[in-house]
Amino acid sequence: MHDIRIVTGKQIMPDCTVSLRLAGYQPQAGWEKGEALFHELERMLRITIQPKAAFAMATHTKLGRVLYVVLTLGASVQRKSDAYFTAHEYTKGMLFDAMADSCLFAFEEQLHPLLEAFCREHGVGITKRYESGMNEDMALQQDAATAVEAERTLGVTCTVDDMLLPVKSMSIAYALSEQTDSFATAHDCQSCTKRDCPMREKETYALCRAGIRVSEQLQSQQVPLFFPCGGAGSCGKCRIRVIRGTLDVTAEDERIFTPEELRQGWRLACRAIPKEEIEIVVPVSQEHEFVAVGQQNHHNAVYPESQNYGLAIDIGTTTIAVSLVDRESGQAIQTVTAVNSQRRYGADVISRIQAANDGQLSALQQCVRQDIQQLFQQLWTAYPLAKATVHHAVVAANTTMLHLLMGWDCRGLGAWPFHPYSLGGQTYEWRDVFGTTDCEGTVMLLPGISTYVGADITAGIWQCAMHRQSGLTLLLDLGTNGEMAIGNQHGFLTASTAAGPALEGGNLTWGTGSVPGAICHVSIQHRQAHVQTIQGASPCGICGSGVIDTMAGLVQQQLVDEKGRLCEPYFTQGFPLASTINHQRIVLTQQDIRNIQLAKSAVRAGLEVLIHQAGATYDTIDHVYLAGGFGLYLRPEQAGQIGLLPQELIAKTSAVGNTSLQGATAAVCHSQVLPAMKTIVSHAQDIVLSNHKAFQDMYIQYMDF
């Protein structure tokens, strides 16, 4: 008898998002009711399923040597499902069926480590996954059932029509080879022929000509693919897959992709130059679903039909937010947000300055203007009577974003000594700022402090009333730049440190922005990660707050040493956090941790220099304000655990949200705000950290955890 292994599933749980999508629920319609019904049915399903699997190696006439697997949840599941339909409880029956399918997916994922171990015993690897009805014909069911003796081992039979009974059963065949380092066990949506599957990832098809870099062609075709590293081939975010033609493998491709992924045609768009016309698939980015931080005080705002309105605009490196403001009451009626599409030219301001100086200034300006116009249109659609009364807008932005909005020369921003074209503080005609005449009015640009401490920090100081306090307070805005200010009514010291995008997930292997499905909170117990995602969606990556939580957990559990080195097997494989809807493992790698170390040590060293230059100590600082979207979700105690913030300041720290937008809103309504901000600027002194030896010394010191 050949080697047949039999496995019983342990703690198989249905996934809520997967189940609802399989059952046809849409986020815009009935999702909350679906979630309630899911939780009602969950206990019944858990006590009904009897997960069991069998697997064995055999030879397939077309595929060669394969590993056959048959999984089943048992007959009781189908009986319970039939009972719902017999009782005319069709909604319950459909969702119960979908939940059972979700359990089959989870069971298969649970089997993967066992299948890999089995293959290692036999000195083989897995190169491809085949499933009947998707990328192989239905006869595969009979072959699999025969190979594992399914009726004897599992109580599963195969009909003359190649259907498995009980119904909640499935078969898989994994192609085997002597490539012992390859274990391509996950379902690959891109190669699946089932195009109408509700679980299928969104994608875009594109034709690319020979001789022109793929990234440039995608940008010209308006394909939403982003390049956080500015096209250096280091972040691995611009993934495309060749489906017709060939593309050479670059050194950057070899570093980012596994051998199996390279064989499947995965490449980096920013490094790819075709030698012939090719057709590619681009997974559609979820960046358009960014959950940006807007106003937090307009949920009870009233919308009068005839009023005096204005617009407050916050242009961040990552996101843009626009608020419709009632200038009489000072209320923000509605806020709309979007990703800053300049991200396709790089995630940080340095990349965009370089792109502007390399001839892309007009394109960058067009990006931000189009983003803002689209947000305006959202507001006009929701509040059509407001448009005619808008005659004034206020913009808060960091200095680089201000230059790119206005189309100002950026050559003075990139190197010491810095010479910005302007730091703002002026008022312009609507057309000169936004490039349109859809409104007749003026636009005020709030004043910044220096090249890398912009009007967003000025607005934050004003919004937190730091300029009116006698005691010392500290403002920290953590993003692609770590901008900070310390002071009181007598003046401020400010600084900025190039933290890079790691703390926002930007240049991490599985890093993502604040999109639905981004892992935002993590706890680690007994080497197992327990995650929460934005909006409870299926995991798709990890954002900034999740990064900090993960690092804190790794430090607490002693899975990483003080130098940032992961213990094995995580040093080699990365620390697993969750799986995507397509069973890809989301991990934090050793290289990711290195990038996090560089970012957190830059922020902490800058903070320490600023405190020292102010003649302050932890004891003399009354309060610390964390501004921006990252700060809003950050857990200060976790930041203290990894040394991002001093432990002595944790109890004094609070999140204050988007103070840049809040300050702009105040400036829309009150004429005295702009003079007050100009006074703040005139009493602020910027510290250039790169000129301080202490910064370099502390930068090395705070690399440790």
Image (cartoon, rainbow, N blue to C red):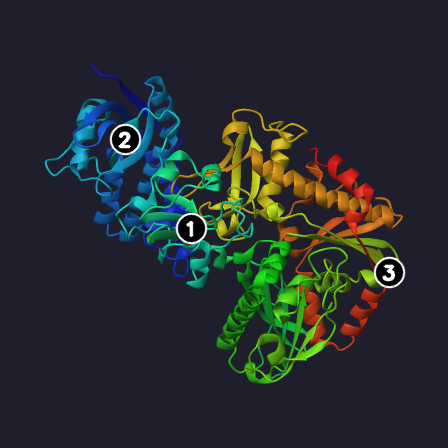
**Residue pictured at 30% horizontal, 35% vertical:** 129
Q: Is residue 192 visible?
A: yes
In three-dimensional space, the C-alpha distance between marks 1 and 3, rounded to whole angstroms, equals 53 Å
Name which of mark 2 and mark 1 comes first in the sequence. 2
Quadrant in which the N terminus is drawn: top left
Q: Residue furthest top?
A: 1
- Amino acid of disc 1: Ile
- Tally of numbered discs: 3
As helix, strand or loop, the secondary structure at mark 2 comes to strand
Q: Nearer the viewer, mark 2 or mark 1?
A: 1
Q: Is residue 659 left or right of residue 439?
A: right
| Residue at numbered disc 1 | 273
Is 124 above or below relative to 45?
A: above
**Residue pictured at 55% horizontal, 81% vertical:** 387
Contact check, label 1 and label 3, Cβ < 8 Å: no
Q: Is residue 412 left or right of residue 57?
A: right
Image quadrant assignment for residue 649: top right
In front here: 520 or 220?
Answer: 220
Contact check, label 2 and label 3, Cβ < 8 Å: no
Image quadrant assignment for residue 202: bottom left
Q: Position of residue 20 (x, y in %)?
A: 36, 50
| Residue at numbered disc 3 | 491
Query: Which numbered tag is attached to residue 175?
Result: 2
Name which of mark 1 and mark 3 comes first in the sequence. 1
In front here: 43 or 661?
Answer: 661
